[in-house]
Image (cartoon, grey):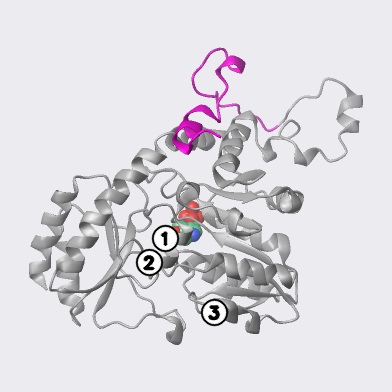
Amino acid sequence: MEKIETLIIHKGRNPKKSSGMVNPPIYKSSTIIYPTVEEFLKDDYPIHTDKTYGRTGTPTTAMLEELLAELSGSDHAIVTASGMAAITVSLLTFLRAGDHVLATDAIYKCTRRLLDDELQKLNITHTYFNPNITTDIEKLIQPNTKVIFLESPGSNTFEIQDIQTICKIAKKHNIITIVDNSWGTPLLSQPIKWGADVVLESATKYISGSSDTFMGFIAVNKKHFKNVHNTFVNLGAITTPDNCYTILRSLRSLPTRLKQHQENAIVVAKFLESHKKIEQVFYPPLPSFSGHKKWKKYFSGASSVFSFVVKTNSDKQLYKFIDNLKLFAVGLSWGGYESLIIPINIATRIERFAPVFKGKLIRIHIGLENPSDLVLDLNNALKNI
Ligand SMILES: *Cc1c(COP(=O)(O)O)cnc(C)c1O
């Protein structure tokens, strides 16, 4: 098979079928016309194709889904309105009232809210587990546990999960594993290959790369595709053909962007690690990081969002440091071309599962600026600590 950089350029488009146009056209339609009544009536399960009603997508959607499946190493991909829509669809496909979910404690904040608020309302309960758990997960399984939800690395503290071990135990108990792979993207990590049933990602982050488009996607093998797709259609969690076009365009440059993001982030992370006002850096490629070995097993590279601890107890000093940065903007999300920074509060975590440190935790996203400018900027602003 061709290498990923080649595949991402040549798949997901078909100039011969689109009047020679390099990129696939944006097909927009809710209604799709049938040639005859007979053909209309014989479509016994029309929502499973992209030729019958626009809510399942149009040929533009199909082009993107085909490419995402190929990159993820899965039989199918389904694109959704946002990363959160992908998470909601994945969970609701496999859960009903009375069921129980095991979820990593280093979970994305909105996924936590989905479990704590929305699923709780439907009488679906959950238990959070230590993100560094391995075989001990077996002890947490209840008779009604139906789903194990993983996110690797974990949000804000970047624990790498032992996906292979957890998926193996889950299979033994007939439990579905769902993995949030937003940090790695399908280019750096393919959890389907380690035995995950469903892999989902926020394409809003690195895949878009421009901080302007919401999208999520679900990668799934044949065995569960029909179920997941059915829930997806029933919930109406669709994205637009325009967004599919935008994301397809962004995908072509993802390998190149990710390489540069990683190169820049390593320069900045090493600088921070050596700075006397920094206590710790949570970035998987650093040999000093506790999950470094697992990262080497599960990932072929790193993206550029990580966190670090500043040696101070003063919020005032911390805010002064951040506000004095000229190249890092204060804002949510990551994966765009521009650098971002925010203070992180991990108070919602279960205390015994959270890392212990002295100081203030900060999350940083390293953009595509020249890393020496970013280092200079941080070095100057750290004088406020
Ligand atoms: C941002 C994010 C999401 C949600 O994605 P949206 O596209 O913003 O809905 C899910 N998981 C992780 C780990 C994220 O960082």
Q: Please give the residue where the numbered disc 3 appears in the rendered image.
A: 129
- Real-space CA distance between mark 3 and mark 1, rounded to the nearest whole angstrom: 23 Å
Question: For the residue marked with disc 1, what is the amino acid?
Answer: Lys
Relative side of 380 to 103, left or right = left
Q: Does the image show residue 175?
A: no
Residue positioned 50% across, 79% down in the render: 130
Q: Is mark 1 within 8 Å of ligand 1?
A: no
Q: Are marks 2 and 1 in contact (CB under 8 Å)?
A: yes
Q: Does the image show residue 301?
A: yes
Q: Please give the residue where the numbered disc 1 appears in the rendered image.
A: 296
Quarter of the image with the C terminus in it: bottom left
Q: Please give the residue where the numbered disc 2 appears in the rendered image.
A: 292
Question: For the residue marked with disc 2, what is the amino acid?
Answer: His
| Among numbered discs 3 and 1, the one appearing first in the sequence | 3
Residue positioned 7% across, 68% down in the render: 383
- Real-space CA distance between mark 3 and mark 2, rounded to the nearest whole angstrom: 20 Å
Q: Is residue 12 magenta?
A: yes
Residue positioned 71% across, 67% down in the render: 171
Q: Residues within 10 Å of mark 1 (few under 14, many from 20)?
A: some
**How far from the left and from the top, in percent, is residue 333?**
38, 56
* Vertical position of residue 192 compared to residue 69: above or below: below
Q: Residue furthest bottom?
A: 352
* Vertical position of residue 282 compared to residue 72: above or below: below
**How far from the left and from the top, in percent, is residue 213?**
45, 43
* Secondary structure found at label 2: helix
Relative side of 105 to 378, left or right = right
Q: Which residues are magenta?
A: 1-30
